[in-house]
Image: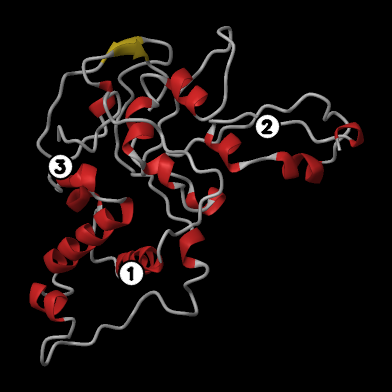
Amino acid sequence: LCSCYPWPVLGLPPVWYKSAPYRSRAVIDPRGVLLELGTSLPDDVEVRVWDSTAEQRYMVLPERPAGTETLSEEALAALVTRDAMIGVAKLTPPQTEDHR
Amino acid sequence: MNGVHDMGGMHGMGPIRYVKSEPVFHAPWEGRVLAMVRAVQATGKIGGGLRPAIENITAAEYLRMSYYEKWFAALVERLVESGLVTRDEIENGRPAKRSAKAVPVLTEANAATYPTREVSARRNVPAAARFQSGQRVRAHNLHPVTHTRFATLRAREGGYDRA
């Protein structure tokens, strides 16, 4: 729970990731932290905290959004966000024409 | 060390200030500090990096300073400790008379690939695993005076995964 972050993959971390509020609370109140960042998870979803260190990084594979079964690898990759890779956000399905 | 930097599990740090699309640097000097740190680290003369110096920042200062302010303060300390630069040189902004001119390790030519070079943190220490995956373990309540990766685990019990 320092500011360790996979720079070569995600670039430099945002300020909130390196800040005291996130670092202090992520480990004791992960569900509350996610909610504060705009991600509300149902109670039956288990939350696990992976603590990166200077020596060890964790790669969190974002959950595939519904309705993306026919998407190509490139189209799927385009949906992936930094926050989903950090593990604090879910991916949103692609906008279909009906939603435009 | 039982320092404020091991803040995992603390209360009272306030709300998370999430910014939707943040600039990489909030001021040009932040980028310069990052570049200076990288250039100095490339010399291999500040073993342990900035971490020891950052952890030695007093608690009130640590909480007050921004991320790159801490980096800069720690860089100055490590530069002086390592003998690369004297405190007088930092304060004057000029090299001491007759000081040797160092050859930069990080150059314009290798700067782009330097951050993504492969560096292994693996240490070949002969040691047998004391626990098996799935075993219940309880962490010692250790408070060493130097750095520890143990802080958040102290005196806690859990399932052992792997080390």
Q: Is mark 2 on a helix, strand or loop?
A: loop
Q: Nearer the viewer, mark 3 or mark 2?
A: 3
Q: What element carries label 3?
A: helix
Quick check: A14 left or right of A69?
left
Residue B41 vertical placement versus A28 (above, below):
below
Q: Which disc is residue B60 wearing? A: 3
Q: In which quarter of the image is the N terminus of chain B?
A: top left
Q: Do labels 1 and 2 touch, CB within 8 Å?
A: no
Chain under callout 1: B
Q: Nearer the viewer, mark 3 or mark 1?
A: 3
Residue beneath disc 1? B36
Q: Nearer the viewer, mark 1 or mark 2?
A: 2
Q: Which disc is residue A91 wearing? A: 2
Residue B15 drawn at (x, y percent): 38, 31
The kind of residue tagged 1 is Met
Q: Residue at x 31, y 83 (%)?
A: B103
Residue A14 drawn at (x, y percent): 46, 47
Quick check: B13 left or right of B159?
left
Q: What element carries label 1?
A: helix
